Amino acid sequence: MPQTIVRCSAPDCREPAAYKIAAPWSDGSFSELKSYGQACTEHLGAVFREAEARRQAYKLSPGETIGEIGIYKYEQGKRDRHLQRLWGLEENYRG
Ligand SMILES: [Zn+2]
């Protein structure tokens, strides 16, 4: 069976995703890594900034929390909790 290729979320980009932009999310009882998008190397900055803007504009429900947005190395088929966070890269894109 062919694998689904996860692509960059920048408009019109057809590159496969190399990074995942995500933030820890919780509703008080359940928690997960909430995805804000995927990016190729070229669009990482744009996708990351767009994700941060979306997170800041988001209105939390009572009991809901969202942590800091991070850049994770995207690996096909790997579970979110096992993704490697790339702290060094995030420094380059924080304003
Ligand atoms: Zn791209």
Image (spheres, helix red, strand yellow):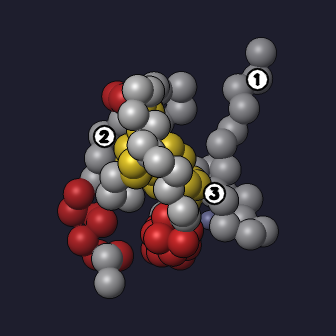
- Measured in 3D between alpha carbons, the distance from the residue under mark 1 to the one under mark 2, in whole angstroms, is 25 Å
- Measured in 3D between alpha carbons, the distance from the residue under mark 2 to the one under mark 3, in whole angstroms, is 18 Å
The image quadrant in which ligand 1 is located: bottom right
Question: Which mark identifies residue 2?
Answer: 1
Residue 23 percent location from the top left of the image = 41, 50
Crowd class of label 2 (few under 14; some 14 to 19; many from 20; radius 10 Å): some
Out of 38 and 4, give the one closest to the viewer: 38
From the viewer's perspective, is the residue at label 1 or at label 2 nearer?
2
Cβ of mark 3 under 8 A from ligand 1: yes
Q: How many marks?
A: 3
Residue 52 percent location from the top left of the image = 46, 69
Q: Secondary structure at mark 3?
A: loop
Q: Secondary structure at mark 1?
A: loop
Out of 28 and 80, give the one closest to the viewer: 28
Residue visible at 73% across and 59% down? 14
Q: Relative to 37, does residue 42 appear above or below in the rendering? A: below
Crowd class of label 3 (few under 14; some 14 to 19; many from 20; radius 10 Å): many
3 and 1 marks in contact (CB < 8 Å):
no
1 and 2 marks in contact (CB < 8 Å):
no
Find disc 2 in the rendering and name its residue.
84
